[in-house]
Amino acid sequence: MGDTVPERPVRHVVISGGTDGMGRATALARLARGDRVTVIGSGEAKGRALLAQAGGRRDLLRFVRADLSSIAEVERVVELITAEHDTVDALALFANRVTHKRRETADGLEYTFALYYLSRHLLGAGLGPLLDAAPSPVIVNVAGVGNTAGRIHWDDPQLLRGYGAVRAQLQAGRANDLLGVASSRAERGRARYVLYHPGFTRSGTGAHPNPLVRGSLKVLAALAARPVADAVRPIVEWIDHPPEAALTAIDRGRTVEPSLRTLDPGDAARLAEYTEELLRARR
């Protein structure tokens, strides 16, 4: 008799921003491997479409509708997942949306900061005990690591003065770099942390509100962007085989050195302190 192949363990994967683009592709890829997948998204119609696309794997997929720009909504999602699951093997963070005029959330926070950065901080922290309970947990934060443009505006992190969409996106991207540094410290938990910049992909190019810009992005994506399947392939593999290092940063296939100024531990501690003060003021 031939050797039997050991059965692959079923993992529980949580994906924020999982109804579009790279998030959706990651969800479908993990469902195809037989994992249980919880997808968090803001649109009911897109959630139903994902469930339909899951086909015969639909029973393995849970869609949770939530506005992740809201602190209370993120906390509700964490409570829901904690009530239904003992472990989370992987947390993949994609949720982001460009807003061209400054918006404030119900918590009085700048929208991009709240959705793109703060929701990721809250999900990682809130699901920390479930990640720690998994045999080989990993968090993958998809942002723009390796890019040194932009900064944290320490004197005005909510961008009350001189708001711009690019400025807001770059600040939140740099905040996610620092989140990875802070979260990878030993006292923060067992999960390996991966900061991942896939580069320009054929994902989300139809979301721009300006039809001329939207059309140009679609043309450019068709000519120069990476296919979504290629961009998510490393994420799908990290879920099965997390890197050994506490923090791994990958920019378009290249390892980012931890000495890069956007990964400064002092700035990471400063942002963590600001974030905790901000949350205490709203609870």
Image (cartoon, rainbow, N blue to C red):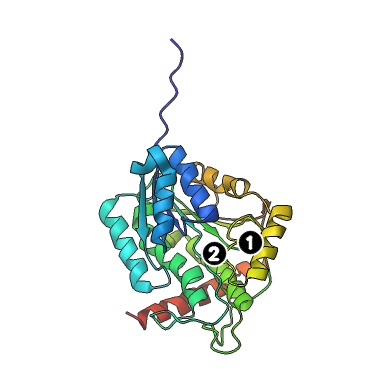
User: Where is residue 110 drawn, in percent x and y?
Assistant: 49, 80
- Give the quadrant of the C terminus: bottom left
Q: Which residue is mark 1?
A: 258
Q: Position of residue 47 (x, y in %)?
A: 40, 55
Q: Name the residue furthest left.
A: 83
Q: Residue at x 46, y 38 (%)?
A: 32
Asked if residue 177 is positioned above or below residue 233 in the image, the reply reads below
Q: Quadrant of residue 9?
A: top left
Q: Are marks 1 and 2 in contact (CB under 8 Å)?
A: yes
Q: Height in image: 194 above or below 101? A: above
Where 279 sits versus 141, above or below? below
Direction bottom: furthest residue: 161
The three-letter amino acid code for the residue at tag 2 is Val
| Amino acid beneath label 1 | Pro
Residue 261 visible (yes or no): no
- Which quarter of the figure is the N terminus placed in? top left
In the image, residue 58 above or below residue 104: above
- Estimate the x, y position of residue 13 in percent, counting from the top left: 41, 49
Query: What residue does disc 2 label?
Result: 181
Residue at figure coordinates x 33%, y 72% from the top left: 72
The reply to whether residue 103 is visible in this rendering is yes
Q: Earlier in the sequence, mark 1 or mark 2?
A: 2
Label 1 residue SS:
loop
Question: Which residue is more in the foreground, 99 or 96?
Answer: 99
